[in-house]
Image (spheres, rainbow, N blue to C red):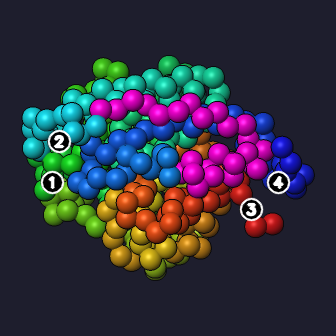
């Protein structure tokens, strides 16, 4: 493997050892989404060269393959307000166990969605690891949506719109109580960024929980550099493990059309890269999801390629 010596130095300086191992875990799930297609996300990201991009940065990457998930043809919706809840809970527990195992081996778990319900399992795994090792977990949620619905507020019954609420302990116990406890994350140890579409009742939950939310208007006014700087400063003071949950729909659909739920007015190419570069510089990210790549809506895999580059930025890829 050839890589430039300057990149190795940069990685070391950032606190990410250049020989650090990444465990890539595919989560081909579309049961949480309204539209089909995101179950092909892990394949699209692999074809986009995500592994090679990370290896070029000096990491050793273990592709652990895909977690086995039943397809919706084989399943029935028992509760229209929590579609496919049992299958989602089963798969989330399998992912949680794998993420915990990777962290216990001092590997970096990179979870490839699949719909954003991937975060239910990944955060449960992060939380379990932190609990056993006396650490406090935090999460940076990069998304067009807040994903703060519960079965009581959801307009669709799609569980991918509930993933953050579930991590915070709100919702059905089959999902909130993986590993037998809730919440997995405290609201003050989370931050939402890129938000521009919130359902009416979901807005109330966000306000009640006093979550730190940075909308696109905040980004327009204050700039992405200032906002991510503040988020990282605050999290670093209070948590020892930062999980980044990256929904590719946070990026503007003009450059990332192949996502589950596109919403206009998203992060620009430069904003998302700067955000991720700042996270890499901080050297404090310990696990990550990349979710909602939908090849059916994509244009020659451009969104998956963009997502793979963005992940590489978050892991230390630099212009200079
Ligand atoms: Mn999302």
Q: For the magenta stretch, what is the residue range?
A: 45-70
Which residue matches tag 4? 7
* Spatial CA span between label 1 and label 3: 40 Å
Q: Is residue 7 left or right of residue 255?
A: right
Q: Residue 310: where, in percent of width, then height?
A: 59, 59
**Secondary structure beneath disc 2?**
loop
The residue that label 3 is drawn on is 318
Name the secondary structure under disc 1.
loop
Residue beneath the point at 12% across and 38% down = 77
Residue closest to the eye, 146 or 223: 146
Q: Which residue is tagged 2?
A: 83
Up/down of 253 relative to 119, above or below: below
Q: Earlier in the sequence, mark 1 or mark 4?
A: 4
Which of the pair 283/212 is nearer the observer? Answer: 283
Instruction: State which tag comes first along the sequence, 1 or 3.
Output: 1
Residues under labels 4 and 3: Cα distance? 8 Å
Q: CA distance from mark 1 to mark 4?
A: 45 Å
Give the CA distance from mark 2 to mark 3: 41 Å
Judge depth for marks 4 and 2 and give the one in front: 2
Is 51 colored magenta in this rendering?
A: yes
**Labelled disc at residue 156:** 1
Residue in view at x 76 percent, y 50 percent = 56
N-term mark: 2 or 3: 2
């Amino acid at each position: 493997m050839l890589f430039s010596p300057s990149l190795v130095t940069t990685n070391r300086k950032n606190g990410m050892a250049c020989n650090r191992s990444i465990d890539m875990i595919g989560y081909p799930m579309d049961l949480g989404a309204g539209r089909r297609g995101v179950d092909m996300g892990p394949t699209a990201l692999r074809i986009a060269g995500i592994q090679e991009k990370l290896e070029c940065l000096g990491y050793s990457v273990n592709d652990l393959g895909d977690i086995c998930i039943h397809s919706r043809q084989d399943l029935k919706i028992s509760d229209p307000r929590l579609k496919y809840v049992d299958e989602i809970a089963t798969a989330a527990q399998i992912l949680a166990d794998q993420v915990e195992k990777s962290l216990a081996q001092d590997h970096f778990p990179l979870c490839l969605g699949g719909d954003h319900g991937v975060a239910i399992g990944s955060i449960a795994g992060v939380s379990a690891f932190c609990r056993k090792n006396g650490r406090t977990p935090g999460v940076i949620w990069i998304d067009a949506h807040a994903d703060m619905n519960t079965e009581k507020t959801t307009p669709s019954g799609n569980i991918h719109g509930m993933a953050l609420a579930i991590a915070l302990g709100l919702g059905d116990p089959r999902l909130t109580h993986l590993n037998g406890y809730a919440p997995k994350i405290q609201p003050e140890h989370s931050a939402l960024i890129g938000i521009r579409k919130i359902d009416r009742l979901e807005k109330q939950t966000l306000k009640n929980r006093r979550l730190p939310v940075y909308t696109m208007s905040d980004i327009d006014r204050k700039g992405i550099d200032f906002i991510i700087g503040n988020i990282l400063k605050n999290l670093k003071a209070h948590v020892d493990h930062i999980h980044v949950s990256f929904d590719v729909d946070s990026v503007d659909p003009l450059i990332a059309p192949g996502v589950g739920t596109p919403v206009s007015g998203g992060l620009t190419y430069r904003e998302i890269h700067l955000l991720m570069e700042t996270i890499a510089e901080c050297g404090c990210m310990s696990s990550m999801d990349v979710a909602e790549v939908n090849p059916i809506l994509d244009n020659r895999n451009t969104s998956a390629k963009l997502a793979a580059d963005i992940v590489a930025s978050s892991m230390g890829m630099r212009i200079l």
